[in-house]
Amino acid sequence: MKFSTLLLTSALSIFGKGVSATDSQTPICTPDLGNSIDDGFHARFYKYIYPDYAREMSDEDYITKGYKRDDRFITSKTGITDVNFFHFYNLNPNGPTYGVVNGLNITTSNFTVEYSGWFVPKETGDHVFQIGQTDDGTSIEIYDDNYSLCCGMIVHRTVIQSLQIYDNEYIKKQSIHLEAGVPYPMKIVYFNKDRVAIQDISFVDPSGETHKSFDGFAKYYNDVKCKN
Ligand SMILES: *[C@@H]1O[C@H](CO)[C@@H](O)[C@H](O)[C@H]1NC(C)=O
Ligand SMILES: *[C@@H]1O[C@H](CO)[C@@H](O)[C@H](O)[C@H]1NC(C)=O
Ligand SMILES: *[C@@H]1O[C@H](CO)[C@@H](O)[C@H](O)[C@H]1NC(C)=O
């Protein structure tokens, strides 16, 4: 339910492992993204135990930060450009439903996935990011700059969040002005508590073309370093 937000963040927390600050006290520092670049996002899969996690915290707290706990981490995958799925049929009434998400056999009835990386626009102009159907929740964050990766300073980010179930097709969207060729840190978090698992994310580029996949637009920098 939040759109554009200005916040104070502890920088290193957004991507977790792989980013290291040389001096977290220095107020201004610049990230060096390095030369080790993967195509696509990295996906990190976590458990969702229902109803335990729902009792522990609100859906909004869970999707914003609560999901990320080492003891609930399952596995990760690289090179992901398709973040959408539709697991609606053949639900198992007597236990978890298994299915495949990004090549991983997982309990589609109850799981969490975080896609992270950088969005690299092909054209300069307004990009409209959209969350259509989701069950139980999707959050997209796009950062205006790389500073969030380093200094732990104030950063600007756009947050598009949708917490709902599949038959509520309320669409959340937000337009963001982006520059061609500039890598913008981006994160998508999804969770499903129980049964149906659906996520439908798309973006419209400045030419008006709708993209359901991040193929050609997503990168992951493996070796980010923070320097003064
Ligand atoms: C959910 O998935 C896990 C596997 O991560 C499984 O062990 C658990 O029993 C499942 N069921 C519920 C209701 O959370
Ligand atoms: C996924 O794992 C479950 C539980 O181990 C298994 O029953 C099922 O056959 C597997 N599905 C696929 C597509 O490998
Ligand atoms: C992130 O850092 C890279 C390398 O310094 C730079 O080229 C790029 O413009 C930065 N991205 C943003 C959104 O400022």
Image (cartoon, rainbow, N blue to C red):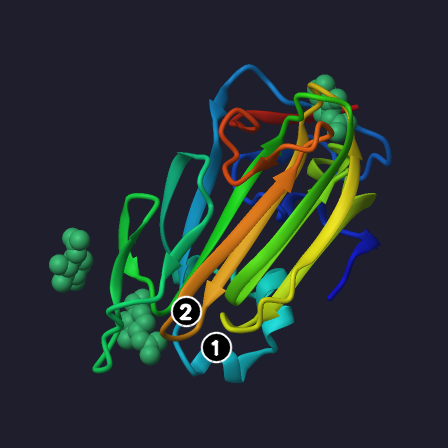
Residue drawn at (43%, 48%) of the image: 44
Q: Along the line of sight, which residue is nearer the eye, 62 or 27?
A: 62
Query: Left or right: 122 with respect to 69?
Result: right
Picture layout, residue 188 above or below residue 220: below
Place of residue 22 in the rendered image (x, y in percent of width and height, measured from the top left): 69, 30
Q: Are marks 1 and 2 in contact (CB under 8 Å)?
A: yes
Residue receiving disc 1? 53
What amino acid is found at the position of numbered circle 1 in the picture? Tyr
| 133 displayed left or right of 45 | right
Crowd tier of the residue under label 1, counting other residues whose Cα lies within 10 Å: few below 14, some 14–19, many 20 or above: some
Q: Amino acid at mark 2?
A: Tyr
The quadrant of the picture showing ligand 2 is bottom left
State yes or no: Cβ of the residue under disc 2 lies below 8 Å from any atom of ligand 1. Answer: yes
| Residue 218 seen from this side | yes
Mark 1 → mark 2, Cα distance in angstroms = 7 Å
Question: Does residue 228 lie above or below 169 as drawn?
Answer: above
Residue holding disc 2? 48
Q: Position of residue 80 (x, y in %)?
A: 43, 36
**Callout 2: helix, strand or loop?**
loop
Taking 28 as reference, is 2 left or right?
left
The tag earlier along the polypeptide, 1 or 2, is 2
Q: Position of residue 30 (x, y in %)?
A: 77, 25
Q: At 52% from the left edge and 24% from the top edge, which residue is drawn?
A: 216
Q: Quadrant of the N terminus?
A: bottom right
* Occupied quadrant, residue 15: top right
Secondary-structure class at tag 1: helix
Q: Residue at x 46, y 38 (%)?
A: 42
